[in-house]
Image: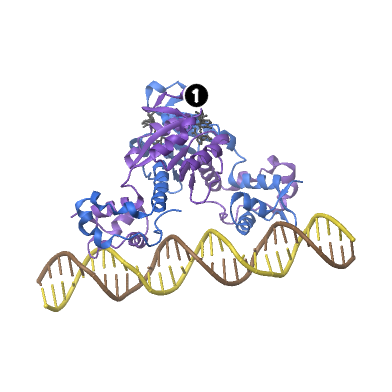
Chain colours: A purple, B blue, C brown, D yellow
Amino acid sequence: MPTVSSEELAAAAGVNSAKLRKDFSYLGSYGTRGVGYDVEYLVYQISRELGLTQDWPVVIVGIGNLGAALANYGGFASRGFRVAALIDADPAMAGKPVAGIPVQHTDELESIITDNGVSIGVIATPAGAAQQVCDRLVAAGVTSILNFAPTVLTVPDGVDVRKVDLSIELQILAFHEQRKAGEEAAADTAAAPAAARRRSAATDQGPDGDVPAVMPA
Amino acid sequence: MPTVSSEELAAAAGVNSAKLRKDFSYLGSYGTRGVGYDVEYLVYQISRELGLTQDWPVVIVGIGNLGAALANYGGFASRGFRVAALIDADPAMAGKPVAGIPVQHTDELESIITDNGVSIGVIATPAGAAQQVCDRLVAAGVTSILNFAPTVLTVPDGVDVRKVDLSIELQILAFHEQRKAGEEAAADTAAAPAAARRRSAATDQGPDGDVPAVMPA
DNA sequence: ATGTCTTTGTGAACGCGTGCACAAAGATTG
DNA sequence: CAATCTTTGTGCACGCGTTCACAAAGACAT
Ligand SMILES: NC(=O)c1ccc[n+]([C@@H]2O[C@H](COP(=O)([O-])OP(=O)(O)OC[C@H]3O[C@@H](n4cnc5c(N)ncnc54)[C@H](O)[C@@H]3O)[C@@H](O)[C@H]2O)c1
Ligand SMILES: NC(=O)c1ccc[n+]([C@@H]2O[C@H](COP(=O)([O-])OP(=O)(O)OC[C@H]3O[C@@H](n4cnc5c(N)ncnc54)[C@H](O)[C@@H]3O)[C@@H](O)[C@H]2O)c1
């Protein structure tokens, strides 16, 4: 029986072995002391706990550059997600297949959700349409939303939203990049607006000081 | 002078106002008691601290479905990121413009990085090519990488990597979705492999118990 | 100038996740 | 069966981020 120890797994994942064991313990206690974890059983238990043993139908709304790329992405199917439908507001796109799936018009949004029992929706529309699309998805029964539009969505309790903001990812990299370079360049207060210059010399922090807690790691 | 209070900002952002004030305090102390924060000055200070006052050239490697969508995305430019070059290994794509920018062949990767002083790279190649592309980017001088390929990249110290894994985003939603539904469906141990069934009845946790600490929020 | 009222900035307490350290479990060997 | 050895499962302590609560600052009215 193939097994792994928490030490091996932790080394591979780059985390602490005690943390890993404690995490596993939340799913139940199914390691064997002196031996480790039964790989097959472990994989199954984690998959089940994560909901990967079921198939989740998802709809993608907004089949533009990004939506089309997502529709073409094979990585979803391999993790148990099935693209149940593609939805776009552009009448010219209706019926046209993307990634082998015909695009349907927004008019049919509600019936698509209901008929397919969809509970996960992906929003890839322009920012202006996102909240409205979100509202319709939620009203139709969707309770989990993956949002690519740069908007903060408002949803009722019980609905989960995850926002993927690629600009913010770049901003985080740029922030660290700036720190790496040292703040020599930060002294260019010439570019600051009038109100900024007002007291920048007095209060701007120097290159010392730690990373502000505001920033994500 | 247009101002905002920490209370207003916190309500808009959906966070605690004290946290917001403490966070701002790390950037310096530039609120006015009894009044609030000078909006213009606040925006400038945050932008500067985040590195948004400079322009960051980025290269995108792998101009397929996703890479092309990224190249077409206008949201980057508006946040101070300039697509300096598009790079792909496919000779057929060389010279062909995507989003108005001609695609260049991988052979020129090193010179592109050097000539443009690029320190941020985006990887949108298939998983198999990601590490190799990453190594070349790093060797050429890139110190920040945004990785879309489903691979854990190994990089030397001093290089930052951020991984965007859309499947994981969906998995997190599916996990919460499963919990919302109650675990009635979790009892389908019939689908479990032999080793799993071995003792599932004995140790599988019931519907009670809290959210495992393993899971991200 | 003095008083009032609003809002900041922050010390202190709290809660939670992480890591240490070890007893208990179980496999394995003699 | 007893001894030994490996690795789990977890109590406990530490550290860090979040939140509370309030004194101090400053605007504004009188
Ligand atoms: N392209 C990227 O790489 C990228 C990166 C980050 C974020 N985003 C965000 O993702 C979203 C989509 O980006 P894109 O580049 O694909 O844009 P796009 O303009 O190419 O596509 C938008 C699509 O949404 C459709 N649409 C508009 N209103 C709709 C509605 N009410 N209901 C349904 N469909 C509607 C349009 O017909 C169009 O097909 C935008 O909010 C963008 O900011 C894109
Ligand atoms: N499409 C999506 O929505 C999506 C979502 C999540 C993750 N991803 C990941 O993003 C990556 C790209 O996805 P895609 O759908 O755009 O794939 P794709 O096949 O459409 O594009 C890949 C591109 O990379 C190029 N390429 C291959 N090897 C290269 C190399 N060594 N150097 C430079 N370029 C090279 C190919 O010529 C091709 O143009 C994949 O790793 C995929 O798993 C994609």
Tell me the residue at 75%/42% (across/down). Answer: A194
Asked whether B52 or C8 is in front, the reply is: C8
**Residue B174 versus residue A24 in the image, above or below:** above
Residue at mark 1: chain? A
**Residue B208 versus residue C24 in the image, above or below:** above
Disc 1 residue type (three-letter): Pro
**Residue B91 versus residue A7 in the image, above or below:** above
Q: Could you say where residue B210 lies in the image, as x and y percent from the top left?
A: 40, 61
For disc 1, the neighbor class at 10 Å (few under 14, some 14 to 19, many from 20) is few
Q: Quadrant of residue D26?
A: bottom right
Q: Which residue is mark 1?
A: A91
Asked whether D7 or A138 is in front, the reply is: A138
Q: Is residue B112 visible to us here?
A: no
Q: Tell whether circle 1 marks a residue whose Cβ is less than 8 angstroms from ligand 1.
A: no
Tell me the residue at 39%/41% (across/down). Answer: A117
Q: Is residue A172 visible to us here?
A: yes
Asked whether B83 or B202 is in front, the reply is: B202
Q: In the drawing, does residue B113 fall left or right of residue A214?
A: left
Asked whether B131 or A186 is in front, the reply is: B131
Q: Callout 1: helix, strand or loop? A: helix
Q: Could you say where residue B74 lies in the image, as x and y percent from the top left?
A: 55, 31
Q: In the drawing, does residue A153 fall left or right of residue A113?
A: right
Ligand 2, seen in the image, is in the quarter at top left
Q: Quadrant of the N terminus of chain A?
A: bottom left
Q: Could you say where residue B140 lies in the image, as x and y percent from the top left?
A: 44, 36
Q: Quadrant of residue D9?
A: bottom left
Q: Quadrant of residue B110?
A: top left
* Count of number-bearing discs: 1
Q: Could you say where residue A41 lies in the image, as x and y percent from the top left?
A: 25, 54
Tell me the residue at 56%/45% (across/down). Answer: A154
